Amino acid sequence: MAEKKAQHYVPKFYLKNFTTNNMINLVTFSNDNEIRLVPYNKQCYKDYMYGEDLVWENKLSDFESKWSILISDIIKKNKVDFSDEEMDIIKNFVVFQVMRTNRHVDIIESNMQNFNRKLMPIITKSKGIELSDGELAELINTQNSSFSRSEWTQFNLNLIESNKEKIQDLKILIIVNKTNTPFITSNHPAFTLNSYQKESGLGLLSAGIIYGIPLSPEYMIMLFDKQIYPIISNLTILDINNTRDIDELNYYQYKRSDGVIFSKDSKTLRDIIKFRISLQMECIKIITRSNICKKFPYYSIKYIDEVILDSQIKVEVLNKQNLIESIKYALHYDPKISFLKVHERANEFQDNENFIWIRNEKNETNINARLNLIMPNVESDKLNRFSSFVRDYCNEKLN
């Protein structure tokens, strides 16, 4: 067998935290919701995921030796006080895990391919090159296929390595699950969340950004923008006794997964399946009471459930119907977590692309440039409130 051919995109040391006798419960949602008990060390890998040169495979192996020790100390020794070096290790663990999975490679590859589809016609036109539709399609296809799968993965990892400093201002929160419902995990276990800007933002730079990952059935780490979430802004550890919060985090873990979730016990997976079905049934009830059945009478309930409810087709078919909020709820599912309420001064600026800004920007010239840019689109009183909010936010003076 070739050296280090099977390269894991979710570390084995991590999945082991969700096992009993080295076995883990798994459900694949494309396989009739069947729950299976499988060896944890045979999950979440691809041949040469990071390339045959082993550069990133070896680098990640070195990282994991540090990550595993610190994560073990949190789980087994209740460690919550960290040195500056340990905080860097934790933050790197979380953001690298966001970027290294099969699902995130798909996302980046798809985004770049869409970018090429938009960019190539502009480039060829600017150079005075006349191409037929077929020739343009072939050029775009050639450009999109110029990277191998492992090269896309390396692109992801190089991107995060060169931008690690952009998360240093985020605060670490250790969440301790005190309920009887354990945390689950998945084949894309580190999630991003933003209760301030749900639909848009600036990635690593976004105000309100949250990164999280369950470490075990009892522990989770969150990195968060402390200016936006006042309930937890001064905390380093949070005990959760509210089962609903755990249910929301678990279901969000499923929705952000690549179709496979894991748990130490099978009951939790069954509960998530039931919750998922209940959301779908609620959508079906709304659909059957609406004009959509008159518009598309050939859509049976079974068809809606099996085809529409688990795909973006649902959004496209039901666009501009009164059902759209219910559809978005079931498809995207923004978790309603009690301790992640945004600052009251941020409420009026939520989910509006005019009010996106770079987190902790302190350069007055840059702030003024951004405010001048949005000025034509915002009434003056609101712009003044936003200006005051941004300056207090950037100077950590929100109250």
Image (cartoon, rainbow, N blue to C red):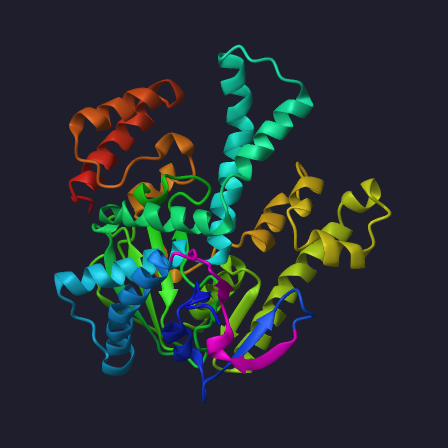
In terms of image quadrants, where is residue 175? Answer: bottom left
Residue extending farthest right: 298
Viewer-side residue, 347 vs 310? 310
Q: Position of residue 331 (x, y in %)?
A: 59, 52
Residue extending farthest bottom: 21
Q: Is residue 357 magenta?
A: no
Left or right of residue 215: residue 129: right
Q: Is residue 308 above or below residue 281?
A: above
Q: Is residue 388 visible?
A: yes
Viewer-side residue, 116 vs 143? 143
Q: What residue lies at 16% left-to-right and 43% top-to-bottom?
A: 397
Q: Position of residue 122 (x, y in %)?
A: 52, 19
Q: Is residue 50 magenta?
A: yes
Q: What residue lies at 50% left-to-right and 47% top-to-bottom?
A: 148
Residue extending farthest top: 128
Q: Is residue 330 above or below residue 69?
A: above
Residue extending farthest left: 83
The residue stretch that appears in magenta:
34-53
Q: Is residue 232 visible?
A: no
In terms of image quadrants, where is residue 231? Answer: bottom left
Left or right of residue 114: residue 322: right
Left or right of residue 267: residue 359: left
Q: Position of residue 100 (x, y in %)?
A: 41, 56
Viewer-side residue, 372 vs 118? 118
Callout count: 0
Q: Is residue 22 above or below residue 165?
A: below
Q: What residue lies at 37% left-to-right and 23% top-to-bottom?
A: 378
Q: Position of residue 334 (x, y in %)?
A: 48, 53
